[in-house]
Image (cartoon, rainbow, N blue to C red):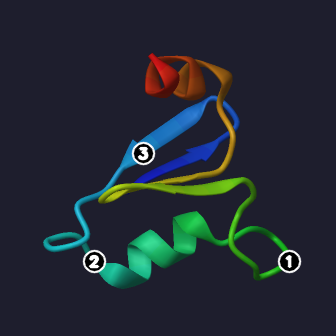
Amino acid sequence: MTVAKGKKVQNFTTATDDKQAILQQAMGPSGNLRAPAYRAKDRFIIGFNAELYEDWVK
């Protein structure tokens, strides 16, 4: 799972990382999941970072 907040990008492993820490980063200020949120096969990309999307689309 990859979570982007502006220029900050964090990668999490859902099997080993603390679920509370993942949720804290993935939720926006309104309490909903950050937008945009994509699921590509077994990978989740949450939030927006232009460089992250450029690398992901390649």
Q: Secondary structure beneath disc 2? A: loop
What residue do we see at 54% from left, 64% from top? Answer: 25
Answer above or below: position of 55 versus 16: above
**Circles 3 and 2 in contact, beta carbons < 8 Å:** no
Q: Which residue is mark 3?
A: 10
Q: Quadrant of residue 22?
A: bottom left
Decide: few, some or many residues near mark 3? Use Cα within 10 Å; few <14, some 14-19, many ≥20. Answer: few
Q: Which residue is mark 1?
A: 30
Disc number placed over residue 18 in the picture, else none: 2
Q: Nearer the viewer, residue 13 or 57?
A: 57
Residue found farthest to the right: 30
Q: Please, what is the three-letter code of the amino acid marked with disc 1?
A: Ser
Alpha carbons under labels 3 and 1: distance apart: 20 Å
First in residue order: circle 3 vs circle 2: 3
Where does the N terminus fall, quadrant-wise? bottom left
Question: In 3D space, how far apart are the residues under numbered discs 3 and 2 (Cα atoms)?
Answer: 13 Å
Quick check: 30 left or right of 11? right
The answer to whether 35 appears left or right of 40 in the picture is: right
Real-space CA distance between mark 2 and mark 1, rounded to the nearest whole angstrom? 22 Å
Residue 55, given in percent of the width and then of the height, sits at 46, 19
Indicate the amino acid at tag 2. Asp
6 horizontally vs 41: left or right: right
> Disc 3 residue type?
Gln
Question: From the image, which quarter does the C terminus lie in?
Answer: top left
Residue 17: x and y in percent read 22, 70
Give coordinates of residue 57: x percent, y percent: 51, 24
Residue 39 is marked as: none
Instruction: Label 1, secondary structure: give it.
Output: loop
Whether residues under marks 3 and 1 lie with C-beta atoms below 8 angstroms apart, the answer is no
- Label 2 packing within 10 angstroms: few (<14), some (14-19), many (20+): few
Location of residue 6 with respect to 28 vertically, above or below: above
Q: What secondary structure is found at the residue carrying circle 3?
A: strand
